Amino acid sequence: MALVSELDLPFIEIFGDAFTADPHQAFAEARRHHWLARSEVGYHALTYASTQALLRDKRFRFGAELGLPPEGQAREALLARSRRNLLNLAGADHTRLRRLVSKAFTPRAVERFRPHVRRVIDGLLDPVCQRGHCEFVHDVTEPYPIMVICEVLGTPTEDWKRFSVWVEILFSRLGLSLDDESTALVLRTQTELDAYLADLVERRRAQAERGDPGDDLLGALVAVEEDGDRLATADLVTLMDNILSAGTDTTRNQLATAVALFARHPEQFERLRQDRSLVEGAVEEVLRFAPVVAGTLRVATEEVEMDGVVFPEGTVVTPTMAAANRDPDVYADPDRFDITRPSPEPHQAFGGGPHFCLGASLARLELFEAFDAVASRLPGLRADGEVRWKSPVGIGGPEVLPIAFTPGH
Ligand code: HEM
């Protein structure tokens, strides 16, 4: 048994350029020495088994406070607002809210959004297809999930641009460094979004009382009742905020990552074009090979012993899904991108344990329809300039993705 701080662990510089350029190489190199690595923010679990164990371990909680200003009013205000987020809830409080909302996100429940999702992606590709080239992030992936989520939540679709701006600002929370000015902007934005959502909920409640809750997620949430348990307006606002923030930047970056991978592996893209039964496997392989949430944050709520290592209370440990998904003990030839790969174990791109991604079925549906549409409509897909990547800390993915293809499909 050894105290984690006394171990001789590999160090990963997660804010360095080399890591941004190729995080997988850094993880693989470190994993050759130990299942744990150290970095500027704490420790990182790098194997499939240790990542899964951490995500399932209730002695660890999500680290909402990490990345916030170290002290002061702004920190308190941000913390107070995020306290009721699903990720920050634990135990019975989490189970209650999660059970009430998860019915709306089962594979069967999200299936009815498929035609709308397809119309959205086709509508975004229509103008692009004629040109033979585009900047895929700006032209397609930025608006895509917002337009889907507006429909899912039951918010007016024409409001997607307002949502897009709000969500972008709120996501700066994840950048792991907020100065006073950006904190103030995040707080103002959160207040605006909350007021908008509360108004939407109240109007929908009134509509439901007249006997027409509406055939969308908000309608379902307003009507949700289990053993006499109903969702208060504040719960509903938090949930919608959670869904908007968690379901937007993730999906758009995962789609852009996929298109960058297809441009880099034209033989895989051609196979997909020739045989659409491969779309489902392609979605899973992209999520395994390059998950946009490379790792998440956990903090030990008590002293924890794991695999011979002692983590004192308060230790920050990152379950590193991107590393777990390429663990050579689980995946043969893990650095090979292969859309026909038979998967022995499910990847961990959506996390695991009690906080497993609530929107996984919707994300899979959105990626499925987008891959199918891109395969039909962008033949000869290739890079058309340098792909610029964001830092993989927080939510990764291409920042700029210029592509070219044969026009007119
Ligand atoms: C490709 C797209 C997506 C990826 C890679 C992704 C990834 C993740 C991961 C890794 C977690 C677990 C975080 C943790 O345990 O610390 C998570 C949680 C969550 N995700 Fe997703 N997600 C995606 C899309 C979505 C969508 C579309 C929605 C909603 C419509 C959504 C809603 C949520 C929510 C609400 C949670 C928190 C669940 C809880 O705490 O119980 N996600 N997601």
Image (tube, helix red, strand yellow):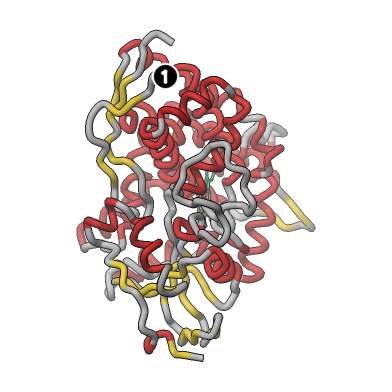
In the figure, 210 relative to 298: above or below?
Answer: above
Q: Position of residue 359 (x, y in %)?
A: 57, 46
The structure residue drawn at horizontal position 36% and vertical position 49%, both measured from the top left corner, is 396
In the figure, 94 relative to 259: above or below?
Answer: below
Q: Position of residue 226 (x, y in %)?
A: 76, 54
In the figure, 93 relative to 382: above or below?
Answer: below
The structure residue drawn at horizontal position 63% and vertical position 27%, both measured from the top left corner, is 277
Task: Return the residue at label 1.
Answer: 378
> Is residue 111 something that shows in the picture?
yes
Decide if residue 310 is on the left or right side of residue 390: right
Front residue of 165 and 324: 324
In the figure, 55 relative to 159: above or below?
Answer: below
Q: Quadrant of residue 353?
A: bottom right
Q: Quadrant of residue 53?
A: bottom right
Decide if residue 402 is on the left or right side of residue 251: left
Of all residues, the one furthest to the right in this rendering is 227
Front residue of 402 and 152: 402
Q: Quadrant of residue 76?
A: bottom left
The structure residue drawn at horizontal position 51% and vertical position 60%, both measured from the top left corner, is 327
The structure residue drawn at horizontal position 47% and vertical position 72%, both measured from the top left corner, is 35
Q: Position of residue 270 (x, y in %)?
A: 47, 24
> Is residue 198 something that shows in the picture?
no
Q: Position of residue 313 (x, y in %)?
A: 47, 85
- The three-letter amino acid code for the residue at tag 1 is Leu
Q: Residues within 10 Å of mark 1 (few under 14, many from 20)?
A: many
